[in-house]
Image: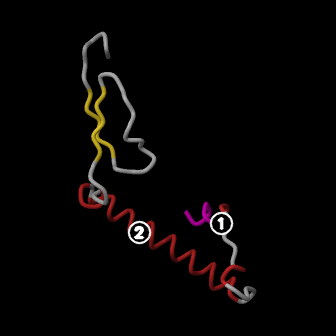
Amino acid sequence: MQKQKRHILLFLENAPVHPPDVQLENIKLKFSPPNTTAKIQPMDQRGIRAFKAYYRRHLVKHIITSADIAVMADDINIIALDVVYWI
């Protein structure tokens, strides 16, 4: 790209995984304002809402079934494998 003298403008979401201080040649990074993904990308809003509802449903079911065994809230264990199955 340098040899062809091309310049690229790359738009990214303002997510913590995207480091803002990256210095690239011929590529300029622009970040969207915080909390605007759902407004800019309406399809994401519907998908994210459905995903959260589905995930919360499984989480609540897990908490309710674990409540019989648990004495305190700290006794309810959620492991990464459970979360992977719910997703």
Front residue of 4 and 19: 19
Question: What's the magenta region?
Answer: 82-87
- 76 and 52: which is toward the camera: 76
- Residue 35 shown left or right of residue 81 in the figure: left
Residue nearer the viewer, 33 or 67 = 33
Residue wearing tag 1: 82
Q: Is residue 41 above or below residue 79?
A: above
Amino acid type at circle 1 is: Asp
Return the residue at label 2.
50
Q: Which numbered tag is attached to residue 25?
A: none
Q: Is residue 30 above or below residue 45?
A: above
Identify the residue at image location x=27%, y=58%.
Answer: 36
- Give how far across and how far down residue 65 sits, in percent: 67, 84
Residue 70 vs 15, above or below: the answer is below
Residue type at numbered disc 2:
Ala
Instruction: Tell me where residue 61 appears, x and y as whole percent.
Output: 60, 81
Counting from the top left corner in percent of width and height, residue 7 is at: 25, 23
Q: Alpha-carbon neighbours of circle 2 within 10 Å: few (<14), some, or many (≥20)?
A: few
- Name the element at disc 2: helix
x 68%, y 87%: residue: 67
Distance CA(mark 1)–CA(mark 2): 19 Å
Q: Earlier in the sequence, mark 1 or mark 2?
A: 2
Element assignment for label 1:
helix
Asked if residue 85 is among those painted magenta in the image, a careful observer would answer yes
